[in-house]
Amino acid sequence: MPATDAPPPAADALRAPSLRRRMACWLYEGLLLFGIVALAGLVFSIAVQQRHALLYRHGMQAFLFAVLALYFCFFWRKGRQTLAMKTWRIRITDRAGRPISTARALLRYLLSWLWFLPPLAASAPWQLPALEVCVLLAGWIAVWALLSNFHPQRQFWHDALAGTRLVNAPRAPKSAA
């Protein structure tokens, strides 16, 4: 029987993790993504024989965007958890608590850029120094995270827009030694 035909879980199983846990997971995910982006950037640089960091930078940005989309969509769809999500016992489901489709995972990935794009777009016309952009970005991330407190199920708004939700993952059973 496919996973999508399974009955929805109980309401307690769909409770959102605390904002603290979700943000800790978010930070850990960023740490892990540093390695993925570094490796993918190296592969791109070698493949196109890039001799200068600004040469083909838009191509590299598009490549990294695609690599991150593949990473997230694969893990969200396949096991419903990235490594950071497994560590913090958080999983992703649709609104009814079922596994998400590839299309919904891709939609969530695209909408997750709302964490970064608004302050970057707002700062672009003024060509602000990097420190000021970082301050705007940090402020927006804090506001975006805190806005989840206004969602009825305490979900991030990009999850609400994508039709997904972050829920507590059950603890793995302890194995007998």
Image (cartoon, helix red, strand yellow):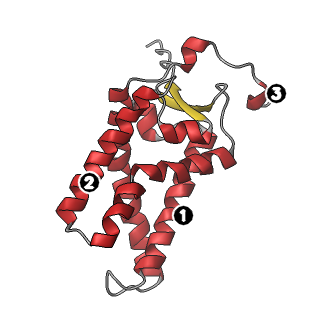
Q: Amino acid at mark 3?
A: Met
Q: Residue at x 60, y 42 (%)?
A: 162
Q: Earlier in the sequence, mark 3 or mark 2?
A: 3
- Dot 3 falls on a residue whose secondary structure is loop
Label 3: few (<14), some or many (≥20) within 10 Å? Answer: few
* Picture quadrant of residue 4: top right
**Could you say where residue 108 lies in the image, as x and y percent from the top left?**
57, 46
Residue under numbered circle 1: 66
Instruction: Determine whether, in the image, residue 117 is placed left or right of residue 107.
Output: left
Decide which of tag 2 and tag 1 comes sooner along the chain: 1
Residue 19 vs residue 71: left or right?
A: left
Identify the residue at image location x=35%, y=48%.
30
Q: Quadrant of the C terminus?
A: top left
Asked if one can make out residue 78 in the rendered structure from this viewpoint, the answer is yes
- Residue at numbered disc 2: 136
Residue 25 visible in the snapshot: no
Report the amino acid beneath label 2: Leu
Q: Amino acid at mark 1?
A: Ala
Q: CA distance from mark 1 to mark 3?
A: 32 Å
Is 20 on the left-hand or right-hand side of 73? Answer: left
The residue where tag 3 is placed is 1
Q: In x, y percent, where is residue 53?
A: 32, 80
- Name the residue at 46% across, 14% down: 174
Foreground label between 1 and 3: 1
Q: Is 36 drawn above or below residue 166 in the view shown?
A: below
Helix or strand or loop: what does disc 2 sit on?
helix
Identify the element where label 1 is drawn. helix
Instruction: Choose between 96 and 89: the one closer to the eye.
Output: 96
| Local crowd size for mark 1, using a 10 Å CA cut-off: few (<14), some (14–19), many (≥20) | few
Mark-to-mark CA distance, 2 and 1? 26 Å
